[in-house]
């Protein structure tokens, strides 16, 4: 077979496919064994040929991929396997083709590989949610200035902020579980395009391989890659959510903020500046999100292929496992980051106390207590804030007398404006206290400490349930694949071919 292909085809075609052999090797061995076991059950292949064929595939399963002999000079992955098997058992290797095109074996191998990656990624997402929920619970009373556009918005807590990342991560974990449901269906028995009478009930091979069911439509089973695209897109969504958190933490760990410090093991020192430790973990997660967005875009671009073409799936063999593996590593990293984070509660409180994050609460208090419409209360507080800031004062320093002075300015500028109530004797200390403000946020999803604790508990329970469920599924995959190897070994009687 060597010398049959142009060097440029080998280099730009087969070599690209063979580079993915390490990702497919184990799955191909299991897929081949299951196929031969079914053919044996249906008496399609002579007994002696079954034993010899199972023997060489079991030998392949014991052979490290680097030693197997995948060589693009002989074609793509399946061609290389066919060549090796034929060299060992001659024409008996040809029985492996009965009722099955090459693409079916590789499609099965991809699903066997990807289902494990998806299970690992779901588990990593759940582990992040668990770690972040625990950190949020510890900081349910750590008051900070919630920010929008990097500007002080209203008093909140670091625990409430952090839970804002946990919920979308849990949603992506649910989407990845749905992607896993799609991936864990069997294309076996689809034949060329419309099934094969040789393999019989498609459910038998599906059960052997630990799939939940078959893919209903045989043509769909062979050619559609939408579920793989969905998995990569969801992985990119998950890590993009974590990248947003990473960017916030990078800003907040700077000397200008000093809100948080990363654990030393998540940083990297400068080789030039002795005082400098860089938040390397956060940089990596942000970059990995960008790479995953690119891979998701690539999968979507490949999906435009006309029907019954393999280009989208040929590239999926490598892109999907690598994308899911990268996403898993990034997610585990962020779980470690939030678990090891040191939060400077005093620095956070000093920041919220130094500004005017209470302004909206003050305006609402004036509306409720004096009957002012909200726009008028807003104008009054805004004018007072501007006066206080110019005088070097803080939100907690605002008094009723200062509001009266601001009211006088507004009326002078607009004589037609209705008079404001006199507020000189009003005690505003509780209204302006950030801690008191946070305690008022008792509505569902709010920042009051007890509400945050309840949400954190709910997130922890959801994450633990996700971990338990996906762990059981992954263990099931491993049992099914091990059972295929056991049955094949028993049938061969320990021979290696």
Image (cartoon, rainbow, N blue to C red):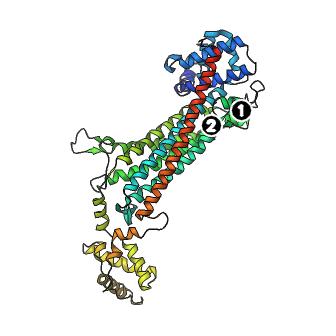
* Quadrant assignment, res 378: bottom left
Regarding residue 149, the answer to whether it shows in the image is yes
Identify the residue shown where x is 54% and y is 51%. Answer: 171
In the depicted view, which residue is nearer to us: 441 or 307?
441
Name the outermost residue toward the left. Answer: 274
Residue 219's place in the image compared with 176, above or below, is above
SS for dot 2: loop
Badge 1 crowding class, 10 Å Cα cut-off, few under 14, some 14 to 19, many 20 or more, is many
* Quadrant assignment, res 111: top right
Badge 2 crowding class, 10 Å Cα cut-off, few under 14, some 14 to 19, many 20 or more, is many
The circle drawn on residue 184 is 2
Mark nearer the N terminus (1 vs 2): 2
Identify the residue shown where x is 29% and y is 43%. Answer: 264
Residue 263's place in the image compared with 194, above or below, is below
The circle drawn on residue 203 is 1
Regarding residue 297, the answer to whether it shows in the image is no
SS for dot 1: helix
Residue 270's place in the image compared with 194, above or below, is below
Per the model, the C-alpha gap separating discs 1 and 2 is 13 Å
Q: Where is residue 17 in the image (x, y as percent from the top left)?
A: 56, 26
* Quadrant assignment, res 381: bottom left
State which quarter of the image contains the N terminus.
Answer: top right
Circle 1 or circle 2, nearest the eye: 1
Q: Position of residue 60 (x, y in %)?
A: 56, 17
In the depicted view, which residue is nearer to us: 84 or 55?
55
State which quarter of the image contains the C terminus.
Answer: top right
In the depicted view, which residue is nearer to us: 370 or 485?
485
Is residue 34 rendered to the left or right of residue 65? right
Residue 434's place in the image compared with 264, above or below, is below
In the depicted view, which residue is nearer to us: 225 or 67?
67
The circle drawn on residue 247 is none
């Amino acid at each position: 077979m060597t010398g049959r292909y142009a060097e440029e085809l080998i280099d730009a075609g087969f070599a690209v496919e063979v580079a993915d052999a390490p990702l497919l090797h184990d799955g191909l061995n299991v897929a081949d064994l299951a196929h031969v076991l079914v053919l044996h059950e249906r008496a399609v292949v002579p007994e002696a040929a079954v034993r010899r064929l199972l023997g060489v595939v079991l030998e392949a399963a014991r052979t490290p991929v680097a030693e197997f002999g995948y060589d693009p000079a002989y074609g793509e992955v399946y061609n290389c396997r066919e060549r090796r098997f034929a060299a060992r058992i001659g024409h008996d290797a040809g029985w492996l083709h009965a009722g099955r095109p090459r693409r079916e074996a590789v499609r099965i191998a991809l699903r066997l590989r990807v289902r494990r990656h998806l299970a690992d990624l779901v588990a990593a997402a759940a582990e992040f949610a668990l770690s972040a929920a625990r950190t949020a619970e510890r900081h349910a009373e750590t008051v900070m200035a919630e920010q929008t556009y990097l500007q002080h918005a209203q008093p909140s807590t670091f625990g409430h902020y952090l839970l804002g990342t946990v919920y979308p991560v849990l949603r992506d974990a649910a989407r990845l579980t749905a992607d896993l449901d799609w991936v864990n269906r069997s294309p076996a028995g689809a034949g060329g395009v419309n099934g094969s009478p040789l393999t019989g009930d498609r459910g038998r091979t599906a059960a052997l391989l630990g799939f939940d069911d078959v893919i209903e439509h045989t043509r769909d089973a062979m050619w559609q890659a939408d579920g793989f695209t969905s998995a990569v897109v969801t992985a990119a969504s998950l890590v993009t959510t974590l990248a947003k958190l990473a960017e916030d933490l990078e800003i907040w760990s700077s000397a200008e903020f000093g809100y948080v410090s990363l654990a030393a093991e998540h940083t990297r020192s400068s080789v030039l500046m002795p005082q400098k430790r860089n938040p390397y973990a956060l940089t990596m997660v942000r970059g990995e999100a960008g790479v995953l967005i690119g891979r998701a875009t690539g999968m979507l671009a490949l999906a435009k292929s006309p029907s019954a073409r393999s280009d989208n799936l040929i590239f999926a063999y490598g892109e999907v496992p690598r994308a899911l593996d990268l996403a898993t590593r990034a997610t585990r990293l962020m779980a470690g980051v939030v678990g090891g984070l040191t939060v400077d509660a005093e620095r956070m409180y000093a920041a919220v106390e130094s500004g005017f994050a209470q302004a909206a609460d003050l305006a609402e208090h004036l509306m409720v207590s004096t009957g002012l419409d909200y726009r008028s209360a807003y104008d009054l507080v805004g004018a007072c804030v501007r006066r206080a800031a110019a005088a070097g004062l803080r939100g907690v320093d605002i008094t009723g007398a200062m509001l009266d002075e601001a009211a006088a300015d507004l009326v002078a500028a607009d004589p037609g404006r209705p008079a404001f109530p006199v507020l000189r004797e009003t005690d505003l200390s509780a209204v302006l206290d950030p801690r008191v403000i946070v305690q008022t946020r008792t509505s569902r999803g709010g920042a009051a400490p007890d509400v945050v604790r309840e949400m954190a508990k709910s997130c922890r329970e959801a994450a633990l349930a996700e971990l338990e469920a996906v762990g059981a599924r992954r263990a099931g995959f491993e049992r099914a694949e091990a059972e295929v190897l056991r049955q094949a070994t028993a049938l061969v009687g320990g021979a290696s071919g």
